[in-house]
Image (cartoon, rainbow, N blue to C red):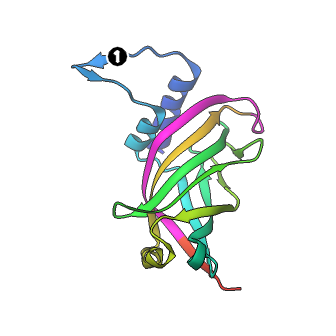
Amino acid sequence: MARLAALAVIAASLLSCAVALPTEIDGRATNLGVADIINALGIGLVTKIDAFITLESLETNLISIDFDVKNPLPIELTLDSVTSQAGLNGTVFATFTHTFPKPGLVVPPLATRNSGTIDNVLLTQGADASLSIIPFGVLDLANNAAVRAFTIGGALGIPIPLNGLKQSSVPTNYTLVLD
């Protein structure tokens, strides 16, 4: 609850007023973005991933996924697009870029929403090598997302690029679709 309150205060400060920061502190550039703050607070936005592997995936190295995204803020967020790399122990196993249909993936305040099926997720190590990570049941993520805050039913809102979101050990379910 303390993290949620801290995130709400930070989001309100970043989104509803202009904040002037010095460009250098002790000779270091201060290029903190919203994603850096989310990473520092350890607030993961993805709560789970479902991966669907077909027999065709063994030839094409393409799978389908869906994921649940949570909104820890007391304001509506709308996810317009996401680019993701998922892996384990520093090795990237899957990548995709997806743009959500209008109005985007609307996540109400303090709620969780499913992304819907995202097809054509590329298994960068190939399907055979990727099968070895199934028993671990988790993935590490590196994401860039185009988000709008303070939306109303997915309309309007303040655009916020979330570049460099990182999240470790996201629970992942794998389903082998054999028909």
Picture mark count: 1
Q: Is residue 74 visible?
A: no
Q: Is residue 115 above or below residue 136?
A: above
Residue 156 within the magenta-colored segment of the rendering = yes
Q: Residue at x 67, y 31 (%)?
A: 150
Q: What residue is shown with label 1?
A: 23
Q: Kindly state the secondary structure of the residue where label 1 is placed.
A: loop
Residue extending furthest bottom? Answer: 178
Q: Is residue 75 above or below residue 107?
A: above
Residue 148 placed where, x, y %? Answer: 64, 34
- Using residue 25 as the reference point, say whether residue 179 is left or right of it: right
Residue 140 placed where, x, y %? Answer: 43, 59
Q: Residue at x 41, y 43 (%)?
A: 39
Between 65 and 59, the one nearer to me in the picture: 59
Q: Is residue 25 visible?
A: yes
Q: Is residue 27 above or below residue 147?
A: above
Look at the image and give the residue range highlighted in magenta: 152-172
**Mark 1, residues whose alpha carbon is within 10 Å: few (<14), some, or many (≥20)?**
few
Picture quadrant where residue 48 is located: bottom right
Identify the amino acid type marked 1: Thr
